[in-house]
Image (cartoon, grey):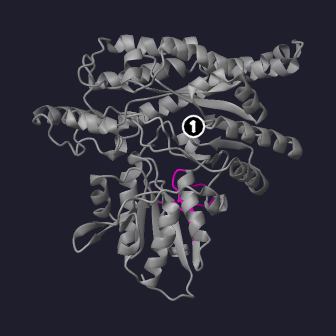
């Protein structure tokens, strides 16, 4: 790819489309993944390079589309030819689309690069056989700069650490991936690079890594934070450039450093007072932080309204298998503390988690569903997200299930089903695979219901009575807003479920599941299911 030093080249970063309608579709239409923006921003600062991001899940304003309703990359190449294309492989369910688009660009003579948590183990070879020229193995901001510099000069990519590529018919892997620790040296993510998108919710990053080491999660390693000043700078820059008021701090561990969290919250509160506006911030936080009343007050003053909490399960045996050192009763009490402090609570759950060998849970599918619904009701969680366990590449859960020969063969159930809505392995007895999906539908179906449509209208009518009849107008407003918001979300969730069920009926997953179960039963014990 050696070129003239004076010639400008274009780098296009692509976030592939989800394979079908799912629970992420609505939110994806008004936000974007932060990783592709960070990579494109680094490239845009390099001499001789232009950069852009195409998020296929948020492609609106005059974005060219093909007859399937997906972004039309042939037209994109006609109006703005890309010389190098990068792909975001953070979600396994989008990988089939990633390969489809990568092969298109590779056949056009374009250099293709992919990175993300999907690409570990055998998946590296799979990518290199499906349209990807180079796989970035670690965090891409440092690697992409070095790789593009070498490629432009016509040098050997073997000198770039943390990549994999085919050389003389074999994989050349140039050492482990690069891990970034000094985030303040990176440029702020530039959302002007995201073309055709409608942005309502802007992602912000503070901490990478997570020390919790849950066996089902791909986010590992010691937490590495940037400064609180950088977080404030990201938010203030987005407000000034884009008029943004809604933010999601994407890290799993908000307030893992308590003193820094208090300092950030103080700075955010002072900033909002100075600009005369009120931010709306969502964070992911540990449940046990509910005991810290000083922190909760500071978070409220900072504009944090919604806390997302990974409850995972209300079943004690499953919590133990996940290495969660907490009891369901304690989880209910802590959730109520968040609500009492004025936060909206979004609960994230995993239904049907597989227990380790030798541990047995004699609960029927009906009993499990009852446990989930009872917990959600007692904890008074505002909104929920319940998914099935996903054996993600590189996790301890996947290794455990593979060793037990329980994962369904991937030639029957491919990557596009790895989004948490489909059973992907043989569950613990007495459950069957279809029990998992039916239970998931029952939990969500009782929480998100059509009848809440009538509550939306009723809450509009009672607004003046509830707010202005109370001596504390601010308290009355918050109480009314929670009821109105939750009613609206529950009706909206019913619409999402209705669309998903329609898409499921049109698909062929049931027949794929039958073949997968038969294949798995025919395989010898501990056989490779890849």
Q: Main secondary structure of the magenta part?
A: loop
Question: Is 528 in front, or is 468?
Answer: 528
- Asked whether residue 434 is drawn in magenta, I would say no
Q: Nearer the viewer, residue 177 or 377?
A: 177
Location of mark 1 (residue): 253
Counting other residues with Cα less than 10 Å from the Cα at mark 1, is it few (<14), some (14-19), or many (20 or more)?
many
Which residues are the magenta region?
A: 51-67
In this view, the residue farthest toward the front is: 259
> Residue at image x 14%, y 31%?
521
- What residue appears at the point 25 percent right and 29 percent down from the top-left corner? 426
In the image, residue 455 sits, relative to residue 94, either above or below, namely above
Query: Above or below — where is 174 with respect to 93?
Result: below
Q: Answer left or right for 410 relative to 152.
A: left
Q: Where residue 246 sits: x, y (%)?
A: 71, 42
Residue 195's image quarter? Answer: bottom right
- Quadrant including the N terminus: bottom left
- Give the image location of residue 41, x and y in percent: 60, 64
**Residue drawn at point x = 63 percent, y = 16 percent:** 336
Toward the viewer: 196 or 451? 196
- Residue 95 appears in the picture as rendered: yes
Q: Can you give x and y, in whole percent of width and height, for residue 125 in the image?
A: 27, 59
Q: Secondary structure at mark 1?
A: loop
Q: Position of residue 485 (x, y in %)?
A: 69, 26
* Whether residue 83 is visible: no
Magenta stretch holds residue 54: yes
Count up the numbered dots.
1
Left or right of 261 on screen, residue 267:
right
């Amino acid at each position: 790819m050696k070129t003239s030093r004076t010639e400008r080249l274009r780098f296009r970063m692509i976030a592939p489309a989800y394979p079908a309608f799912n629970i992420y579709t609505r939110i994806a239409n008004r936000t974007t993944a932060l990783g592709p923006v960070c990579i494109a921003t680094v490239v845009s600062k390099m001499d001789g390079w232009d950069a852009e991001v195409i998020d296929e899940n948020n492609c609106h304003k005059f974005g060219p589309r093909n007859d399937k309703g997906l972004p039309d990359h042939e037209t994109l190449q006609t109006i703005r030819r890309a010389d190098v294309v990068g792909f975001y492989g953070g979600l396994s369910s989008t990988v089939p689309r990633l390969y489809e688009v990568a092969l298109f660009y590779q056949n056009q003579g374009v250099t293709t690069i992919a990175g993300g948590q999907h690409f570990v183990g055998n998946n590296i070879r799979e990518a290199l056989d499906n349209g990807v020229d180079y796989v970035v193995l670690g965090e891409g901001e440092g690697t992409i700069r070095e790789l593009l510099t070498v490629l432009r000069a016509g040098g050997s990519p073997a000198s770039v650490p943390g990549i994999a590529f085919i050389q003389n018919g074999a994989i050349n892997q140039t050492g482990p991936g690069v891990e970034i620790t000094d985030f303040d040296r990176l440029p702020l993510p530039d959302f002007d690079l995201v073309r055709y998108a409608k942005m309502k919710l802007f992602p912000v990053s503070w901490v990478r890594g997570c020390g919790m080491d849950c066996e089902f999660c791909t986010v590992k390693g010691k937490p590495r934070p940037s400064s609180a000043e950088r977080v404030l700078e990201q938010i203030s820059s987005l407000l000034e450039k884009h008029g943004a008021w809604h933010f999601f701090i994407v890290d799993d561990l908000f307030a893992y450093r308590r003193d820094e969290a208090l300092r950030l919250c103080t700075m955010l509160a002072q900033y909002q007072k100075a600009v005369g506006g009120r931010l709306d911030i969502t964070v992911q936080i540990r449940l046990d932080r509910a005991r810290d009343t000083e922190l909760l007050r500071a978070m409220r003053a900072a504009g944090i309204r919604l806390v997302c909490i990974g409850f995972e399960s209300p079943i004690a045996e499953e919590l133990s298998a996940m290495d969660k050192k907490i009891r369901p009763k304690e989880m209910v009490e802590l959730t109520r503390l968040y609500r009492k402090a004025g936060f909206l609570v979004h609960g994230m759950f995993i239904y049907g988690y597989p227990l380790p060998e030798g541990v047995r849970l004699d609960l029927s599918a009906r009993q499990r569903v009852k446990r989930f619904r009872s917990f959600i009701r007692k904890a008074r969680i505002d909104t929920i997200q319940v998914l099935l366990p996903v054996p993600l590449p590189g996790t301890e859960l996947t290794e455990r299930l593979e060793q037990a020969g329980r994962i369904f063969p991937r030639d029957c159930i491919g990557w596009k089903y790895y989004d948490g809505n489909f059973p992907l392995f043989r569950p613990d007895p007495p459950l069957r695979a279809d029990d998992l999906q039916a239970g998931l539908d029952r939990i969500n179906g009782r929480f998100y219901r059509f009848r809440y449509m009538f509550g939306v209208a009723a809450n509009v009518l009672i607004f003046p009575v509830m707010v202005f009849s109370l001596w504390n107008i601010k308290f009355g407003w918050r109480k009314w807003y929670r009821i109105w918001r939750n009613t609206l979300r529950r009706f909206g969730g019913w619409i999402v479920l209705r669309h998903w069920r329609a898409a499921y009926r049109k698909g062929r997953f049931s027949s794929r599941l039958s073949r997968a179960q038969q294949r798995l039963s025919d395989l010898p014990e501990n056989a490779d299911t890849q």
